[in-house]
Structure formats: structure tokens, C-alpha cells
Amino acid sequence: MLAINSNHNKLIATQGEKPVRNIVIAVIVAFLCACTIEQEMTAPEVRFMPGTTVDFTFDSNGLILSGIFDTPSKKESEALIIFVHGYGGSDIRGRNSYADLRQRFNAIGIATAVWDKPGQGRSEGAFDINQSVVSSAEEVLDAVRYLRQINAPGSDRIGIWGISRAGWIAPIALSKDSNINFWISVGGTTAEDNFSYLLLSNLPYEGGTVKQAKKLAEEWRAGCSIFRTGGSYDLYQSATQQLRANEYIKKMRGEWQSQAQYETQQLGCHTGNCANIDDDMCSHVFIKNFEAMLSSLEVDTLAIFGERDLNIDWRKTSKLYKNTIGLNSKASLVVASFKDADHNLHVSETGSIREMQNMNSPMKSDGYYDVQLKWLLDTVLENRSSK
């Protein structure tokens, strides 16, 4: 639009018309340009009323993403929690996502916001199940920036609630915006991909045994060591025979690399790309220097885990948080774990993916809601009232 208007100005300057006509046309063009700019810069107005859920949209990575915002009904919003999804698709309106938490947070005076991923719900774009965590973190930062800009209820004290994959997304956003004040991490992650842990921990519930899973884990580690230290493809094959032959692993993981792929990846490792995989199981590292990033966060953090979580190694993540955020004198860390809970904090007998998928009426572990509300009241809202 602006390019067309500049061309109009060029025509006016070269046509040799009467000065008066030139002035009139120039004024009209300038007026149209001003209107266009104003329309492009003005976002749709969002009216926040107590006790209501309203739609909002914001621009991120060139896409218009669509979300919903809940405003508390009984008291003024003292904070705002934005929800960050885990892995997979989203449908916040169809599923009424996080309704259980949104209602409880609203009841203590905290507003909430959540939006659909690109290509999901009413959000623009094409859905990419492998969207980078950096891109997802940019969405968080863009949403926070927009909600502050329109002075959304509670936006002067914003926190993040995130599950699973959000364990990578939230720290990136927190490290880039020091004014995001608190973080609730549910089923959080270490720096590396959890895929090998997920496969091996679920094997006993997919026709295998605990003993077999331990044996395959030994082979996985041996193969990783051979790969990283320049061992041959034949040596790698010999060390991982049972692992590569297991039907469940093969079904979930896909075909193992060919000799050409192995040697190409190994060559890349020698040229410095080995930093992208961890030393233990050769899992992909999502965030370099993750420990340093977590150590630098000056935020109040509540970390929640299910002790029957077979998706992520919750003990490893808990230890990571304690050795980073927990040692920062300018941060605070509370860790809560539930003995009967799976990755989604649902009561579970095994915590296996198969059981999670077959749940008809999932129920949160007893105390799951209470620990969050108490922490918010004691740490987030109490700190606010004392300032």
C-alpha cells in the first residue's frame, strides 16, 4: 500500500499539472497513507471485563496467533499466568484447555492467557509438530509484549506455566525477558531429548522386561561411546545387535542409520557438531549451555513431577534444577513430586504411555492443585503485597 502511494507521489511531481490540483491530490494521498498506517498499527480492541473469557490475537513470526484470556471476577488481577503447551497439537477452545487450572488461578486473583500453536485452532500458519523451541519461545515473548502493550489485567506481573516440552521453551523466554517474574514447570526437561529414556522405560510395558531394558540401555550407551570416539560402523553394529533388532524400539524409533549416514554424522562430530548430542545416549541437545541458562534465571520457580513419569527422567531434571536455580541466591525453587502420578500428573498404576493413552477418566494426583495454589499465594501474591 505504501509503495503504491509513493508511486502516486512520483507521478504528481512529473506530470506538470496545475499547482492547486497537485496540492489537492497530495493532501488526499497523504490522508490515505495516514489512515492505512493507523489501521496497520492498531490491533483489534480487547475489552477485559471481570469474570469473562475473551478472545485476543497477536502477531508472532509473521503469523496472527489466536488465544483466550480469563479475567478474575471477584478481585482485581494481581498477576497473569500464560500457559505454554507441551508436544503435539492444540485446540484451546475445542478442548477447553487448562480449564481446571484457569478457574483455580482466577479464583485467587490471577488472570490467565493461552493461545493455539500456528496452524491450530484459529491461529494462522501451518502446524509443525517439530517446531523449534526457539520459535516457540519467541511466541511467548511476543504474547507477553502484546499483553503488556494493551495493559491486560495482571500484565505488570507475568509468570509462565508450562508442561513437558515447555521445559525448554520457558527458560529461553525467561532468559530473554527478566521482567517475567515466576515459573511453574510441570514434567520439565533436561537439555537433551528424552526419546531414549522414553523408549527404554516403556519397554517393560510393551512386551519386554526390566532386565531387557537395562541390557538395551547398556548397548545404547556403548554404541554412543563408539560413535563419539571415532569407532567404526562395524564395531558399532556389533555392540548394538539386540538394541537394533528389538521390534518395539524399531517401530518407535524407525530404521537405524546406514553405514554412509553413520560415517557422515561421525565426520560432522569430528568437525565440532558433536556439541549437539549428549555424551550419555547421543541424544539431541536442544539448548546448549542449558545449565548456565538455568543458573542465570532470577525467578521464583515451582517444579512439579510425577514419580511414575516414564516420558522424562524426572529425577535427573529435579537434580538439574536444584543444582542451578536452587543455588542462585536471587531465585527461589520449590520441588514437589507425586508418587502415584504419570507425566501428565494423572494418577497411574504404571506411568506408561500405553496406560496414558487408554485413560477414560484421568484424575490429577491428590495435592496437584493445592501445591500450586499455595505456592502462588505464598510466593507470588505474598511477595507482591509486601512490595
Image (cartoon, helix red, strand yellow):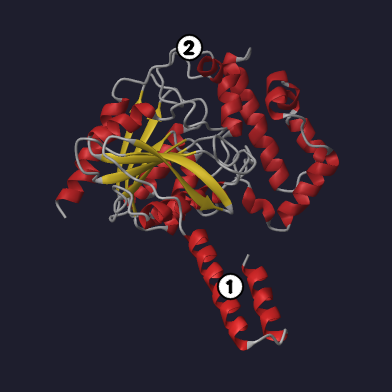
Q: Specify the quadrant of the image occupied by residue 89.
A: top right
Residue 360 marker: 2
Q: Specify the quadrant of the image occupied by residue 320.
A: top left
Residue at 55% across, 69% down: 33
Q: Can residue 372 be seen? A: no
Q: Position of residue 162 (x, y in %)?
A: 43, 39
> Is label 1 in a helix, a strand or a loop?
helix
Q: Can residue 109 be seen? A: yes
Q: Specify the quadrant of the image occupied by residue 52.
A: top left
Q: In the drawing, does residue 336 fall left or right of residue 90? A: left
Residue at 60% across, 76% down: 25
| Residue holding disc 1 | 29
Residue at 65% across, 87% down: 18
- Is the residue 367 above or below the residue 126 in the image? above
Q: In the drawing, does residue 129 fall left or right of residue 357? A: right
User: Depth check: 192 or 16 in front?
Assistant: 16
Label 2 and label 1: CA atoms lie apart by 62 Å
Q: Report the label total.
A: 2
Q: Position of residue 374 (x, y in %)?
A: 22, 34
Q: Position of residue 141 (x, y in %)?
A: 46, 53
Kind of residue indicated by mark 1: Val
Q: Residue furthest left?
A: 386
User: Depth check: 42 or 179 in front?
Assistant: 42
